[in-house]
Image (cartoon, rainbow, N blue to C red):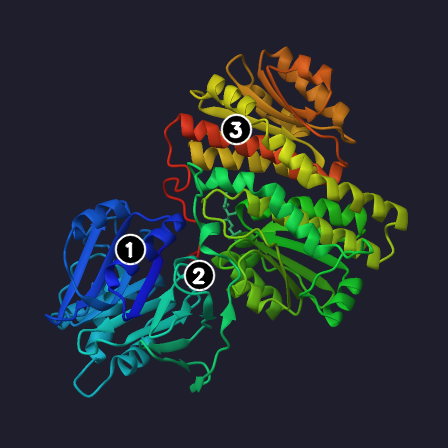
Amino acid sequence: MCGIIGYVGYRNTIPVLIQGLEQLEYRGYDSAGIACLSHKEDNLFIVKEKGKLSALKEKIGDFDVDAHIGIGHTRWATHGEPSRANAHPHTDATGRIALVHNGIVENYAVLKMAMQKKRIRFESQTDTEVAAKLIGTYYHKKTSLFDAVKQAIDELHGFFSFVLFSKDDPDTLVAYKRSNPLVVGLGQGENFLASDVTALLPYTRQVIYLEDDDLVTLTSKSVSIYSLKTRSWVKRRPTMVHWNVSQAQKQGYPHFMLKEMYEQPEVLRNILSKRLTKKGDIYFDTVNKKFHNQLKRVKQVHMVSCGTAYHAGLVGAIAIEKFAHISCRTQVSSEFRYGNPILGKDDLVVLITQSGETADTLAALREAKAKGAKTLAVVNVVGSTIAREADAVIYTHAGPEIGVASTKAYTAQLATLLLLVFSMAKMRNKISKEDFHLMVKAFKRIPEYCARILREGKSFERCARKHSSRRNFLYLGRGCNYPTALEGALKLKEISYAHAHGYAAGEMKHGPIALIDHEQPVICIAPESSTYDKMISNIQEIRARDGIVIAIGSEGNKDLEKMSDSFFSIPKAPEILSPMLTVIPLQFFAYRMAVLNGRDVDQPRNLAKSVTVE
Ligand code: F6R
């Protein structure tokens, strides 16, 4: 989704804006632009370009602009094709205001028509330009930019964040937030605004997460926040971000995705060290006693999330029914929010999200709260909107995930959900002391097992080479590895653009079996499990029809190895923990397929890291 950076201070602005945009590239975009105010000539300097940042940088070239205030934007097209004209920043009719925007102005067409009747001319197809022009109509000699935005906001419908400045005031940025995230970065003699903290990490780790309806004036020395909700000036407490710049850099890896895959053992180790007490109990620092007691009483759990996080929720649901004996439904957020779910005080809605900003998951959270359910967010990005709005939050501590395709955030979600399940099973007396301790003991071995699988990188490479030209893949799994099949298929299609379909293996005979012939690769996830024999029957059915079997099985399983065209082994672990291992060969396979097909691994076409529009 779109990325925003804003700067006011003593530094030369253009390099700050470019570096900020580089840090935001991972969000996915199709064009980019900057605007700054030339100190000497009192001129708005605006450069925009379609395509990658390199195109924008080339266009800026050696322009020597001495500017100390500016805004930058990476655009992910919603209204109007990706083009230079549609790229941000946009200006008001007089060309004094420059504005960047994330989100959607829903009533832009009506507003545009009304302004066109007043002979205001538009240069783009965007809703953003409508907002810029509308604010311009309120911006007169006696009205500050802050007041102009305050008045215009009442006319704008939708969900959006803006950052803007006027050439009349070279030391003031104005920003407004509704739904789409905006963070203030606090510096000494300089201040920043960004759509996400990674853009701020090279300069500051002291940030203020803005809340909905915050209207902000930012100068090089001050930050003033006015809440349009309470109609008063407010103080928001700064937060210290614990991520560092190097975590958000490739550190010698060719892609962020590969780096993040290799970080998984460390992420899992870190989660366990945070969550396990010396006595071997499970502990969540951010869950207070009251919420802990409520967890003991819930009668129904709902796992709600999107994409990869939804797959983590499917595993969590299987675990919670099996170990904590609580009935659990899993739904994608976009269906949950419009499905009129029946919820009450005995329901626990668990919202799982890496970014903490996904629009559908946020809407689902608000729906659940409005209906009186307890809400628990399982989130990676500290301080994100969903983390702040839920009744309780558990952080997954995966560190910044930059690759658009989620890898370490997924294994971190799995680990966190499973620990939550075991802790709930224990507090409700559904698991014996011995079984609990055995499970914790087995859990502690998972990071090393994960590292062992990662050391097998070369064999995934060979398998991917063999199949790199194929365009259709079927993924099969059962039980808690059915979600692994879905996740493996999602990884492959999103970064290699090959078609891949995840299926519950038992469903194969109800349709997909028609696909099987000598050209159809089928990835079968078959570690030791309660349904292992059933998986083997499915594999035999595939072989009987000449299908190509790529199997993931337990170490030492020679029978399965013989049955397969390619075989990847994973160390033996309790079935419920195995999804943290079985997914790794699938991430690797997808990664290698994407590289071999020359795809843009970290920023696949049409995708965005944080989906903040519906
Ligand atoms: C896939 C992927 C997406 C996200 C989904 C939810 O690799 O990354 O499917 O999982 O957009 O995002 P979050 O977890 O930020 O809510």
Tell whether 337 sits left or right of 58.
right
Residue displayed at 27% across by 68% down: 131
The disc at residue 197 is 2
Circle 3 packing at 10 Å, graded few (<14), some (14-19), many (20+), is many
**Comparing labels 3 and 2, the label whose residue is closer to the camera:** 2
Q: Residues within 10 Å of mark 1 (few under 14, many from 20)?
A: many
Report whether the residue tagged 3 is closer than 8 Å to ligand 1: no
Q: Percent x, y for residue 492?
A: 49, 32
Left/right placement of residue 62 relative to residue 270 reads left
Give whichever of discs 1 and 3 has the lower sequence position: 1
Q: Nearer the viewer, residue 74 or 546?
A: 74
Residue under label 1, please give it: 18
Q: Is residue 68 above or below residue 603?
A: below
Horizontal side, residue 50 vs residue 607: left or right: left
Q: Amino acid at mark 2?
A: Val
Q: Nearer the viewer, mark 1 or mark 3?
A: 1
Image mark for residue 589? 3
Q: Earlier in the sequence, mark 3 or mark 2?
A: 2
Residue 420: x and y in percent read 72, 54
Q: Earlier in the sequence, mark 1 or mark 2?
A: 1
Looking at the rendered structure, the kind of residue marked 1 is Ile
Q: Is mark 1 within 8 Å of ligand 1?
A: no
Q: Where is residue 11 drawn, in percent x and y?
A: 27, 66
